[in-house]
Image: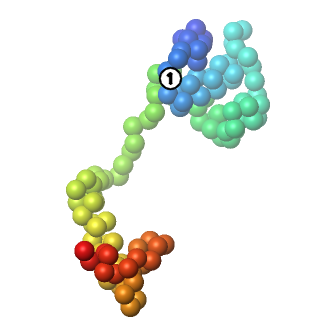
Amino acid sequence: MNVPILKRLIHKGKVAAHKRLHAEILLKADLSELGERWRDQQIGGTYGISTRTVDRVKERLVREGLESTLNRAEPTRAGKRKIGGENEAHLVALMVAMRLKVEVAGHYACLGNAWWNWDMLRA
C-alpha cells in the first residue's frame, strides 16, 4: 500500500468525502511498519461506521487495488433506466393532477398536506 499517497490525499484541500474516508480507513488498518495498526472496532468507532464497512474497504483493496478502493464503484444496474428526464416530469405532473381530481372536497382540494381553494388552483 502506498502510504505517502494516502497521507497526501487526506491532507489535500478538496477531496471527496468518500475518498478521504477510505484513505483514512486504509491508513488506520495498515499493519506495516508505517501503519497505525488499529482494530476494525476502533476504526469504526472513530469514523462512525460499521466494522463491516471497514472489512469491505480492506477486501476491495486486496481484490481491486488502491485506485478502485478510493474511487466509487460504477453502479451495477440490471437493466436500463425505464423512465427519466421529461417523461418522469410528465408522469409526476399527471399523478399530481389525478390526486387533485380525487381529493376535491367542496371548493377545496388537498395538494400534499395543504388544502387550497379550488378556484385558485383552476386559474
Q: For residue 65, say whether it is visible.
A: no
Residue 21, placed above or below residue 88: above
- The answer to whether 55 is drawn above or below residue 120 in the figure is above
Task: Look at the image and tell me in which quarter the C terminus lies.
Answer: bottom left
Residue 114 location (% of width, % of height)? 46, 73
Q: Tell me the residue that label 1 is attached to.
A: 15
**Residue flagged by tag 1: what amino acid is it?**
Val
Up/down of 107 relative to 19, above or below? below
Q: Is residue 73 left or right of residue 84?
A: right
Residue furthest toward the bottom?
106
The residue shown at (65%, 34%) is: 54
Please tell me which residue lies in front, 55 or 6.
6
65 relative to 105, above or below: above
If the image is split into quadrants, where does the N terminus sit?
top right
User: In the image shown, does 94 or 109 lie closer to the viewer?
Assistant: 109
Observer-nearest of 105 and 11: 105
Q: Give the SS element for disc 1.
A: loop
Query: Can you see residue 57?
Result: yes
